[in-house]
Image (spheres, rainbow, N blue to C red):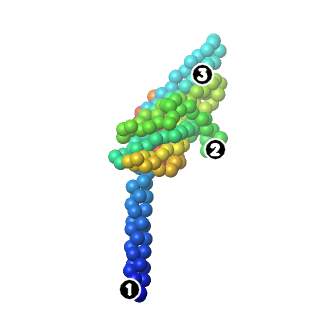
Amino acid sequence: MAVNAKRYTLAALLATLAVAVIVTVFFVLLCPARITFSVARTGSSHNSSGPAGGGSSVLSLTLAADNPSRRAKVTYESMFVDVSNSTAPGAQGDNWVRATVTTRMPLRQQGRTAAIDVTVPLVDPWTQDFTGNMSSLFSVMVTAQARFRVGVAWTRLYDIKVSCSPVSFFTAKAIPAGAAGGAAGLPVRCV
């Protein structure tokens, strides 16, 4: 009878060990891929409406989302982009503008890199204040929710938040020495 109890105990321990190995392998396989974002392209346009010089401006940028994983596919369920004039007084908290993500969501990233188009519509006279008379550098904050697929299994929803700076929307703006990015130094890597 003692031999049977030992066998049952040993079988239970081996079954527990097997389940632990399977669960560990499952979680390792379903870990999310390392997604990186960068600002790949920037631009601006101005539309005058009337002799007083009023009108509107549009800042535009293209984000590049890079998924280097061959095993994990990514789907962006939603994405929000905020732009801030990082050289204006008070730029640390209250100088953010919500941009419009023009790329349709949810976005299934088919290849290694996906392009996400974004616009920031501005209306005069606020345009001059926000853009620093078309001479400022900007910060771009990207907030996304993504789900990863490994084989047939989907992961939970992950929140991704990155900041990209310095970004220039105006080609005449010089980027300070030692700073990467801007219209003259694209792409701007996000961290």
Q: Residue at x 49, y 44 (%)?
A: 146
Secondary structure of residue under mark 1 = helix
Mark closest to the chain's N terminus, 3 or 1: 1
Q: Is residue 115 positioned above or below 22 on the image? A: above
Residue 103 in sight in this render: yes
Quarter occupied by the N terminus: bottom left
User: In the drawing, does residue 170 fall left or right of residue 96?
Assistant: left
| Alpha carbon distance from label 2 to label 3 | 24 Å
Q: Which residue is mark 2?
A: 93
Q: Which residue is mark 3?
A: 56
Residue 19 numbered mark, or none = none
Looking at the rendered structure, the kind of residue marked 1 is Val
The image quadrant that residue 128 belongs to is top right
Q: Where in the figure is residue 131, as x and y percent of width and height? A: 57, 31
Q: Is residue 132 positioned above or below 124 on the image? A: below
Q: Where in the figure is residue 99, as x and y percent of width and height? A: 57, 33
| Alpha carbon distance from label 1 to label 2 | 71 Å
Residue 140 in sight in this render: no
